Every structure is written in structure tokens, then in C-alpha cells.
Image (cartoon, rainbow, N blue to C red):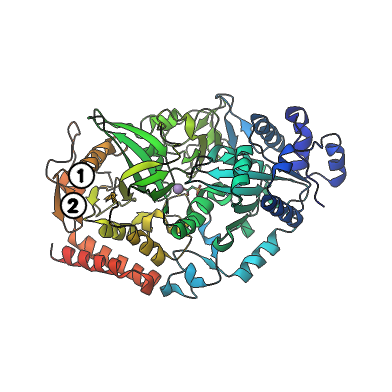
């Protein structure tokens, strides 16, 4: 029989003892530490039978010393901070209000896509036909047998001497018909504290579970290697998803999407499977509200690969007079057509896990106004006065400590902050958070933007001729690799719908699902492809980006009103001459920004064809092949 022992009620007084538990001290030390701190946790009685069964099974497997069911209270948050400070896992940043710095093991700094798997009986559920029995670029398959083996090789006893935390969490506002519930079990207080920011956790979620027992089971353990303060196990890291059982299992990494299982694992990989089953869309998209000078407000969703400026767009300060942007979410959108045929979106998250480097008062003043309270910073540099710094924030101050905890030497080429260093901040404290960001019904979506980092060949903005063409644009998206995963170098990768690392099922089926969204009576959002990152021959950006992107949004919204401010090109519609408002901008080379080099596009079509053939094969819908043929024709006859 498993004994639940909560973090005690008088958290602060007893936190030191609890910290010893979490630190993994000896059994004898435990007994001492535990004496007098075993307080019955009222939350345990509140567990539904299914949650309790999950907790008991996980505890039997991982053998923690201690189980704590999170209630989401402030006192609990305080205790977690105490525990982590005593473990040496975080330190306070005295320059700010309730801000904390974590340094990870240098081997645990990003998502590990090569170690991320989807499990199903049939490989074809996960991997498109063309890659049967081979490695696929669109999702790693693992058989149920190897799935079980991977767990049994890693989990037994992995939480010995530690506290096992049980985090009931809701993706989306608690109680919204668009929201879903998960329960994450973890031995990392950093994960608990981060989940508290990134999702809604605690008693209110358990309450909701009593009405509907269904939840996604998320089991996470950091492993027993790693550096002091950051246990992990990079050699054995694995991230497993089993959609049929609503289950996620993650071992060996404490970082971001590997460990905050509500984010990529649930909201995207499992989410995409659930969405397909239930007829909606789970997408790697930000959501923003834009009010135009006439006072009309529209919402758009936008898909970009990780670390391509989604947070910047989501919090943009428009330079065009009369425009206002408000933020609903910066990473994930769950979208469903309502009974009136309107696509409505919620942000399933509760916080921002944003890339720090490049964020500044110029590039993203709203993020800067968000992140200096109640925030956990991971792998940024530390200033002498107990603040943080990263590349692109300002000129480097004297006396920095780099992300590895070493004195920063600017003469060396290594950065002070890791390129994938992050801030983790509550969304509610963003000064331009949208009034409707927690609306249970979601916000109505007028347009969908797709994009990536394309240094050459790809115009600033192109509108799809129709929904089918838009789905093709999403399918053929490519982008330069970023630091968000384990890739290096400036290689241009295929990243359809910015979902390549996040598909929970066969990409061909995903495209069919997208195509099936277009139905009579529905108001289909217009789809656009944008590229803020085009460069000239000297490697200089052709477009200023950031707040100036409001000029593109202005054109997008005018197109949503069917204003005839467009012209036809081989790729789709672009702004008619003079239609893109560039007033006040200097030296914009419109011809270069919008040029469609024939050789480039013939190569692009070939590359996309090769990708579709080699990675998807017969699972690619005919409509998408037709669109590719159309594009080839258009480009050749240009
Ligand atoms: O590490 S995360 O997956 O949360 C961030 C990202 O890749 O966008
Ligand atoms: Mn992302």
C-alpha cells in the first residue's frame, strides 16, 4: 500500500526537511527528515479513482520516497522555491520581483527530436507510406513492444529518495468546452513550478476531473545523472507518446518541451490526434487580435517553426498609426468551427516559454514589460547586480556570468546566454494580453499566416488563392534550422505547418484532415505565407520586421475584407503596386522583396516534390499533388 506524504501545510518551516527528501538523501536521513512532517494531504482524498490508479501505478514503478499532489496554492509555490534553492537548482535574481535563474546541465538544453517517438500498433498510423520500415523525417515510430521496453529499462526505481509530484493541469481555461485535462507526474520541482506558470494546475482541475474523468496521463522523470542541481540523463533521454492510451512518458530531460508535457507533447502531438478524431485543429500557432484604425478587431493565427519570432509577432507593437495588437497566445492554437461556421481558437497555455536572445526594448517591448516579474529564466547570463542578460538585449555589461556559470569572456566566440535560453512567464502579466484570451468559446479567426526563415527566393507575403492552395502552402513550408532542437548550421529544412517535430499521426492523414475542414456554410479563413527573413546579396535583411510587420497585417486584413489590393503571381496573390503601406520606411527594395526568381522556384518545386515522394508517397492527398503541378506550371511559364 502506498503512503501519501504531502509537502506539509506549514510549508516554509518544513521546506528544508522536504528539500532533503527531494535531494535524494539516504533512507535513514529520510526517516529523520520525515519525522513530524507527514501531514495528510486533503488533496489525496479528492483524487478520482482513475487518477489515483495512475499515481499508484507510477509510484510502484518509480518508487519515490514521498508523493505530493499539487494544489496549485501560493504556499505550495513558495515551498517549491525553497526546495529548489536548497537543491542548488535555482537562485533568486534580486534585481527583480520573484524572478529565478536556472542553469541546466549543458547537455540538456533543447528538445531532442531524435529521441522523440510516437507509438501505435500500426506503423502507418505514424509514418507515411513512403517511409514504411524506415526512418521518417515526419515522426519517429516506436512499436508497443519497444515502448514498454524503453519504460522498463528506465523507470523502475528512478525516483528513489525523491519526491514524486502529481500535477493535475488543464490545457485551456478550466471548464471551457475546448479545454482538455492532463495529470503530469514528475520528480522535478522545476517542472512543477514551470507547469504552474505554463498551465492551470491544482485543485480546480481535480474538481473538473470529478465531472469528466478523462485525462491524459503524463509520466516524467529526470533520471539520475546530470550536474548538481540539474539531474538528467542525456544518454538515455526518451520522449514517448501513445495516443491510443492518451499517454505520454518522458525520461532523462528536464528541459522545455521535453519535460513540460502539456506543451508540445500534449497540446500538439497528442492534441493533433485528438483533434482529428473530434474534428478540430491542434496547431503550432500564435494567436493575436488586431484592431485597425476603423476600430474593427480581427484575430489571426500564425504558424512558424520554433524560434522564428512567434513571440515577437504575438506581442507586436505596430508602427502603422491606428493599429493595435493584443496577444492571445504565442505558441499553440486549438481551433474548432462553431455552429455558425466560424473558426474559433483558444490558447491552451497559461504562460510564455519564450526564446530570450534577441528580445529587447526594440524588438519586443511588450515581452520586456512581461518577463521581469514572477519569471523563471533558464540558461541566460547573469549580471553583477543580480539581473539577467542575453545577446541582443543591450550592449553586454561588465562582469557577466555566462549560462554555464562561468565568468563571461567577450573575446571568446561563445555566447553568454545559450541560444535556446528561455523566459517562462505568466501570460496574464503581459501588458497587451487580450481581453478575450481566456474566453471559453475562443476567439474568431479571420486569417491564418504560415511562415519560416527563408533567406532567399521567398516573397514577403503571398496569399493563397483558396483553402486547398493554402493547405499546399502549409505542406510545402521550409525554414532555416534554429536552436530550439538539436540541429546546427543554417540548413533549410522542410517543416510543414511548422509541425514537423510535433505531428502525432501520419502527415498524409493530417493534410486530408486540413482539406476536410472546407465545408459549405463555413467561413474559411484566408491563408497567407509570409517571410520576414529575406536577405539581399550582402546578407542584409530586406525587410525591417518586428513592428513594421504591421504593414503586412494591414494588407492581410484588407484582403480579408476582399479589398482588391492584390495581384496574381505564379505563387498566389501579392500586394498590387502601392498596396502595401510602406510610408515612412526608407530604402525598401520592393522588387527584391517580392521577386520570384525562376531558377530558385524550379529548384524549390523539385525539392518539395522529392520530399513529398520520399517522405509521404501514396499518403499524400491528390489535391496536394495537383497544387504542386499547378505551381510548377506557373513557375515554368513565368
Ligand atoms: O522546448 S519547447 O518545445 O518548449 C520550445 C519550442 O521548441 O518551441
Ligand atoms: Mn513552439
Q: Residue at x 65, y 66 (%)?
A: 148
The answer to whether 10 is drawn above or below residue 283 in the figure is above
Count residues near mark 1 (Cα–Cα under 10 Å), then give few for <14, some for 14-19, many for 20+.
some
Q: Position of residue 371 (x, y in %)?
A: 49, 31
Mark 2 sits near ligand 2, with its Cβ under 8 Å away: no
Q: Nearer the viewer, residue 432 or 154?
A: 432
The answer to whether 502 is drawn above or below residue 410 in the figure is below
Measured Cα–Cα span from mark 1 to mark 2 = 10 Å
Q: Position of residue 60 (x, y in %)?
A: 76, 56
The secondary structure type at the circle numbered 1 is helix
Q: Position of residue 634 (x, y in %)?
A: 17, 63
Q: Nearer the viewer, residue 411 or 110?
A: 110
Q: Which mark is residue 559?
A: 1
Marks counted in the figure total 2
Quadrant housing the C terminus: bottom left
The secondary structure type at the circle numbered 2 is strand
Name the residue beneath numbered marker 2. Answer: 573
Q: Earlier in the sequence, mark 1 or mark 2?
A: 1
Q: Are marks 1 and 2 in contact (CB under 8 Å)?
A: yes
Amino acid at each position: 500500500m502506498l503512503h501519501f506524504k504531502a509537502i506539509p501545510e506549514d510549508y516554509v518551516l518544513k521546506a528544508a526537511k522536504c528539500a532533503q527528501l527531494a535531494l535524494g538523501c539516504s533512507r535513514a536521513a529520510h526517516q529523520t527528515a520525515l519525522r513530524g512532517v507527514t501531514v495528510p494531504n486533503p488533496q489525496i482524498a479528492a483524487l478520482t479513482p482513475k487518477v489515483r490508479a495512475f499515481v499508484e501505478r507510477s509510484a510502484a514503478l518509480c518508487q519515490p520516497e514521498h508523493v505530493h499532489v499539487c494544489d496549485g496554492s501560493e504556499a505550495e509555490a513558495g515551498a517549491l522555491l525553497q526546495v529548489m534553492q536548497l537543491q542548488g537548482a535555482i537562485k533568486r535574481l534580486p534585481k527583480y520581483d520573484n524572478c529565478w535563474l536556472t542553469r541546466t546541465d549543458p547537455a540538456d538544453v533543447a528538445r531532442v527530436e531524435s529521441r522523440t517517438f510516437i507509438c501505435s500498433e500500426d506503423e502507418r498510423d505514424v509514418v507515411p507510406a513512403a517511409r514504411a520500415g524506415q526512418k521518417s523525417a515526419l515522426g519517429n515510430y516506436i512499436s508497443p513492444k519497444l515502448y514498454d521496453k524503453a519504460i522498463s529499462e528506465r523507470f523502475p526505481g528512478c525516483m528513489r529518495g525523491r519526491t514524486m509530484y502529481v500535477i493535475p493541469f488543464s490545457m485551456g481555461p478550466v471548464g471551457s468546452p475546448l479545454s482538455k485535462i492532463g495529470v503530469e507526474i514528475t520528480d522535478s520541482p522545476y517542472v512543477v513550478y514551470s507547469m504552474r506558470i505554463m498551465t492551470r494546475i491544482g485543485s480546480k482541475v481535480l474538481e473538473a476531473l470529478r465531472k469528466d474523468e478523462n485525462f491524459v496521463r503524463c509520466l516524467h522523470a529526470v533520471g539520475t545523472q546530470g550536474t548538481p542541481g540539474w539531474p538528467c540523463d542525456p544518454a538515455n533521454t526518451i520522449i514517448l507518446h501513445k495516443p491510443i492510451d492518451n499517454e505520454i512518458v518522458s525520461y532523462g530531460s528536464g528541459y522545455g518541451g521535453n519535460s513540460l508535457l502539456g506543451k508540445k507533447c500534449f497540446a500538439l502531438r497528442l492534441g493533433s490526434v485528438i483533434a482529428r478524431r473530434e474534428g478540430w485543429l491542434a496547431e503550432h500557432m500564435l494567436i493575436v487580435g488586431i484592431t485597425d484604425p476603423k476600430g474593427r478587431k480581427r484575430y489571426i493565427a500564425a504558424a512558424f517553426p520554433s524560434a522564428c519570432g512567434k513571440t515577437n509577432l504575438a506581442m507586436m507593437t505596430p508602427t502603422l498609426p491606428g493599429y493595435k495588437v493584443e496577444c492571445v497566445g504565442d505558441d499553440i492554437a486549438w481551433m474548432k468551427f462553431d455552429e455558425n461556421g466560424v473558426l474559433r481558437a483558444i490558447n491552451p497555455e497559461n504562460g510564455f516559454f519564450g526564446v530570450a536572445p534577441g528580445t529587447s526594448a526594440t524588438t519586443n517591448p511588450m515581452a520586456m514589460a512581461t518577463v521581469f516579474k514572477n519569471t523563471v529564466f533558464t540558461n541566460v547570463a547573469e549580471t553583477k547586480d543580480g539581473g539577467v542578460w542575453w545577446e541582443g538585449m543591450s550592449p553586454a555589461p561588465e562582469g557577466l556570468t555566462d549560462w554555464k556559470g562561468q565568468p563571461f569572456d567577450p573575446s571568446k566566440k561563445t555566447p553568454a546566454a545559450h541560444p535556446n535560453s528561455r523566459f517562462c512567464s505568466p501570460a496574464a502579466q503581459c501588458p497587451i494580453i487580450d481581453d478575450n484570451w481566456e474566453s471559453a468559446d475562443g476567439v474568431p479567426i479571420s486569417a491564418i499566416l504560415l511562415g519560416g526563415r527563408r533567406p532567399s527566393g521567398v516573397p514577403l507575403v503571398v496569399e493563397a488563392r483558396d483553402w486547398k492552395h493554402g493547405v499546399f502552402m502549409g505542406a510545402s513550408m521550409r525554414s532555416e534550422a534554429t536552436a530550439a532542437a538539436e540541429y546546427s548550421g543554417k540548413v533549410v529544412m522542410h517543416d510543414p505547418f511548422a509541425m514537423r517535430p510535433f505531428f502525432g499521426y501520419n502527415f498524409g492523414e493530417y493534410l486530408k484532415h486540413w482539406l476536410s475542414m472546407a465545408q459549405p456554410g463555413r467561413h474559411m479563413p484566408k491563408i497567407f505565407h509570409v517571410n520576414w527573413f529575406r536577405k539581399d546579396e550582402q546578407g542584409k535583411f530586406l525587410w525591417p520586421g518586428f513592428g513594421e510587420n504591421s504593414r503586412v497585417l494591414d494588407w492581410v486584413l484588407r484582403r480579408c475584407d476582399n479589398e482588391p489590393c492584390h495581384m496574381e503571381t505564379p505563387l498566389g496573390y501579392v500586394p498590387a503596386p502601392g498596396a502595401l503601406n510602406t510610408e515612412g520606411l526608407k530604402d525598401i527594395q520592393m522588387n527584391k522583396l517580392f521577386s520570384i526568381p525562376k531558377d530558385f522556384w524550379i529548384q524549390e518545386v523539385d525539392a518539395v516534390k522529392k520530399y513529398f515522394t520520399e517522405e509521404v508517397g501514396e499518403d499524400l492527398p491528390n489535391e496536394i499533388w495537383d497544387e504542386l503541378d499547378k505551381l510548377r506550371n506557373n513557375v515554368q511559364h513565368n
